[in-house]
Amino acid sequence: MAKVSVASVRNVQVRVAAGDHEWIADEPPEIGDGAGPGPYDLLLGALGSCMTMTLLLYSKRKEWPLEKVEVDIQHDRVHADDAANVEQAGGMVEQFSIDLVLHGDLDAAQLERLADISTRCPVRKTLAGTHIFHENVRLAGK
């Protein structure tokens, strides 16, 4: 189970803590102070990191010559009518555009398999799945 703690710092900056690691998240200067990545930057970073790690681990286990992985991801909210393969018209859908570049002496079959494996990383499965949120809101000290 993954767990992070987030606390406000100043303006809209927040401190994110995950185990032994801490970082600042913020909004760009037009909204915040630009002191750190924004929430969607962190989300896309999590997706790209997971895809990359999944490919590196798989290739290592298979002893394939994958030397480096590069992932560029863009997120947009688009009207469902504008998105391909959307079953329900109307409203907005989340669209992720992913450019995945693999480096190494890979053959066509390995490249095809790695393309498939990249879609199976846990973060991507989480984003694509059905979500349930359990939320408790309370006053401090209560």
Image: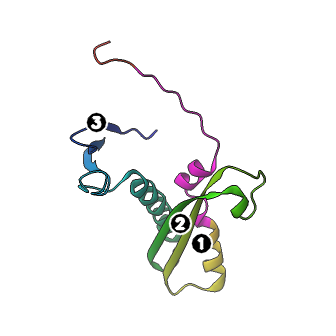
Residue under numbered circle 1: 114
Image mark for residue 42:
none
Dot 1, crowdedness within 10 Å: few (<14), some or many (≥20)?
A: many
Looking at the image, the residue that sits furthest to the left is: 10
Question: Disc 2 and disc 1: Cα gap in Å?
Answer: 8 Å
Q: Determine whether the residue tagged by mark 1 lies in a helix, strand or loop.
A: helix
Q: Nearer the viewer, residue 141 or 104?
A: 141
Looking at the image, residue 69 lies above or below residue 22: below
Does the stretch in magenta take in 125? yes
Image mark for residue 58:
2
Name the spot of residue 69 as percent of width and height, x first.
Answer: 45, 74
Q: Determine whether the residue tagged by mark 2 lies in a helix, strand or loop.
A: helix
Q: Are marks 2 and 1 in contact (CB under 8 Å)?
A: yes
Question: Disc 1 and disc 3: Cα gap in Å?
Answer: 38 Å
Looking at the image, the residue that sits furthest to the right is: 87
Residue under numbered circle 3: 7
* Direction from residue 118 to residue 15 in the image, left or right: left
Res 65 visible: no
